[in-house]
Amino acid sequence: MARGCILLLPLAIVAFNLAKADVPAIFIFGDSTVDVGTNNNLEKCSARADMLYNGIDYPFSKPTGRFSNGQNTADFIARYLGDFIGSPPPFLSLLKCMSTFRSNILHGVNFASGGSGILHDTGKKRFVSLSLSLSLYLPLDLFFARFLPYYQACTRQKKVVPLGQQIRQFANVSANIKAVLGLTEADRLISNSIFIISAGSNDIFDNPPTSISPPVLITELQSAYAIHLENLHKLGAKKFGIISVPPIGCCPFVRANYSATGDCVDDLNAIARAFYDSTDALLRQFSSDFKEVKYSLGNTYLMTMNLIDNPVASGFKNVKTACCGNGTFNGQSPCRVGANLCSNRNDYLFWDMFHPTQAASELAALTLVYAEGPEFVKPMNFSQLAGADV
Ligand SMILES: *[C@@H]1O[C@H](CO)[C@@H](O)[C@H](O)[C@H]1NC(C)=O
Ligand SMILES: *[C@@H]1O[C@H](CO)[C@@H](O)[C@H](O)[C@H]1NC(C)=O
Ligand SMILES: *[C@@H]1O[C@H](CO)[C@@H](O)[C@H](O)[C@H]1NC(C)=O
Ligand SMILES: *[C@@H]1O[C@H](CO)[C@@H](O)[C@H](O)[C@H]1NC(C)=O
């Protein structure tokens, strides 16, 4: 596709205005759950979601790099938090056009990269041995099929963008915002912006209990996470919307390949729960070390388990099988043209073997932004975070 040098307008003001928080800008970091096309820009990297059936419900049925039938959680959060019609564009796409770069970054940037993690090496290891309840081993190339439809790519090329590098990219953006607005205005913009981070699942997938004991992994992840948060804080970030790890033991891929019964694999879910608890502790510490820091922590584990346990109440008819894919639960091969594709996509929790449908992403974002009470998001929901004084 030819990429002209144009002023991107994904952030155009929408005509109607609901009760929105009107955050000035949103910066998004993390993995494929919030990637809106970063990996499309990685050279020689064929591992990405820029081919159908991904995007089949996106305007013009356009595959954009989102691992979804349509929009993803980043898009919906942006829509609910401000006058945005979706996520801000990927940093690597904006960089392609330096003449418009500076005007395109002022309402936010998305740095998220599918396959990446909190740890530098996540998504880059050549082989991983995974031994869950069933003691199976598999090469990373196969394993990586979970995020990367054509798995012979980004991983070997060491191309995914880890969280640390995403933050260095934000340093570039921050410097450019300062150059445009001046220090005072730039600081004000960045302080009032929301920093969304959705990461951790890939670190757990890539460091299974056989290679590292879960408590050691969790400790390692949290010390790395702490450094990332402090680095963002040094760059002026004050409002953090942190999205924890979903029940990865329930995704169609794991149900299909690692569960004799087709049930969720609790060894993996237990690590996701431990990750949430340690992130909770980390954020309490972080916000007490830096008083001006405000945060929301979203418990996507509980949110998703709630849907899986109460499919009827939640409006989903199928919470086990992916809409798009092949094999058991459509969880054994990637979503691509020629795979099985469901027609009633709003009835499915899972789009492909790892990722939620647009409908599920919308529900997740609604909960993160508007939920009351601490069960799903605490100590405040994202809309309160947006309105908080810093
Ligand atoms: C999952 O299981 C299927 C069927 O046994 C197999 O073909 C496929 O390679 C497995 N996938 C992975 C990533 O292990
Ligand atoms: C941001 O990155 C681009 C591309 O690497 C580079 O041209 C530019 O100089 C960088 N800007 C800053 C402020 O670091
Ligand atoms: C997926 O399964 C369907 C049958 O259900 C088959 O027609 C199709 O060829 C398979 N596609 C792939 C990519 O394996
Ligand atoms: C967010 O949380 C607060 C406190 O629980 C609640 O009053 C409010 O209704 C929630 N939703 C919004 C949009 O603020």
Image (cartoon, grey):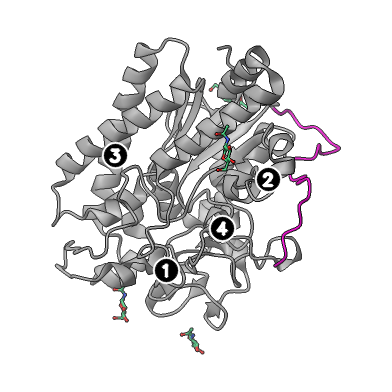
The residue located at (52%, 70%) in the rendering is: 323
| Magenta span | 1-20
Residue kind at label 3, given as amino acid type: Phe
Q: Which mark, by number, is residue 56? A: none
Residue kind at label 1, given as amino acid type: Ala
- Eye-nearest disc, 3 or 1: 1
- Eye-nearest disc, 4 or 2: 4
The residue beneath circle 3 is 275
Residue 388, horizontal then vertical, whole percent:
58, 16
Residue kind at label 4, given as amino acid type: Asn
- Eye-nearest disc, 3 or 2: 2
316 or 204: nearer the viewer: 204
**Which of the two discs, 4 and 1, labels the residue nearer the N terminus?**
4
- Of the 4 image quadrants, the one containing the C terminus is top right
The residue beneath circle 1 is 153
The residue beneath circle 2 is 86
Residue 177 lies in quadrant: top right
Residue 218 lies in quadrant: top left
**Which of the two discs, 3 and 2, labels the residue nearer the N terminus?**
2
**Which of the two discs, 2 and 1, labels the residue nearer the N terminus?**
2
Q: Helix or strand or loop: what does disc 1 sit on?
A: loop
**Which of the two discs, 3 and 4, labels the residue nearer the N terminus?**
4
State the predominant SS element of the stretch in magenta: loop
Q: Helix or strand or loop: what does disc 2 sit on?
A: loop
Q: Helix or strand or loop: what does disc 3 sit on?
A: helix
Q: Is residue 252 visible?
A: no
Give the answer, above or below, for where 328 lies relative to 369: below
Is the residue under label 2 in contact with that under label 4 (CB below 8 Å)? no
**Which of the two discs, 3 and 1, labels the residue nearer the N terminus?**
1
